[in-house]
Amino acid sequence: QVTLKESGPGILQPSQTLSLTCSFSGFSLSTSGICVSWIRQPSGKGLEWLATICWEDSKGYNPSLKNRLTISKDTSNNQAFLKITSVDTADTAIYYCARRGFGVWGDWFAYWGQGTLVTVSS
Amino acid sequence: DIVLTQSPVLAVSLGQRATISCRASQSVSISSINLMHWYQQKPGQQPKLLIYRASNLASGIPARFSGSGSGTDFTLTIDPVQADDIAAYYCQQSRESPLTFGSGTKLEIK
């Protein structure tokens, strides 16, 4: 059974760095073809893909967030991480981690965590 | 970026067919592979995968849900609509990075 669970600080101040953790089970990020992504959703709004990391340590980022994102993984502990620097109120959202589908063209999000709410406020 | 356009709201009667559309700003197909996917999101819940690669039903999803389309025009069909289907529905493309989502269609009951 595949499960994912996000954790984060809950609230932080503008200009700080947001650190998020995705803890998962039922698969390994060392298995060929496996990738984990981060997606966010401001309250009442749509979904925005942020970043993806894959089994062979390839990474992809949404250019809209320019150089503020860093994704990483700890394969031994079944975790993936996302850091967002210089946050502001526009980064207030629910942050989800998700596992991709399968195959060469498998970049859909087959499994999702429950999400963690991050609020940026002074 | 590939922009995906969805109508904001669709109202249907219970037991009827719902057709939710998603139009891409450029083709999201590679040969016969259609890189469009659909999700359902109920209030307070995470999104759930319904359909992958335009027409493949995800595991555990009822056969009332189906998907079709190619190129730039895609459709999610729910037939018949049940009360439990009240939710927002999002399309997502994986033809190119950045991966993008439509703005969502809220399904309402007439």
Image (tube, rainbow, N blue to C red):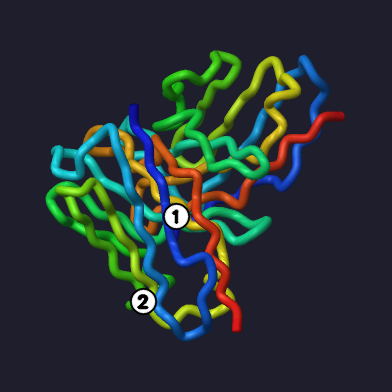
Would residue A5 be found to the left or right of residue B101 on screen?
Answer: left
Where in the figure is residue B72, as x and y percent of width and height?
49, 42
Q: How many marks?
A: 2
Image height of A9 relative to A33, above or below: below
Where in the figure is residue A107, as x and y percent of width and height?
33, 43
Where in the figure is residue B85, as x and y percent of width and height?
68, 27
Which residue position is annotated with label 2?
A68
Q: CA distance from mark 2 to mark 1?
A: 15 Å
Give whichever of discs 2 and 1 has the lower sequence position: 1
Q: Chain of mark 2?
A: A
Q: Amino acid at mark 1?
A: Ile
In depth, the one of A67 and B11 nearer the eye is A67
Kindly state the secondary structure of the residue where label 2 is placed: loop
Which residue position is annotated with label 1?
A39
Q: Chain of mark 1?
A: A
Would residue B110 be found to the left or right of residue B59 on screen?
Answer: right
Image height of A66 relative to A77, above or below: below
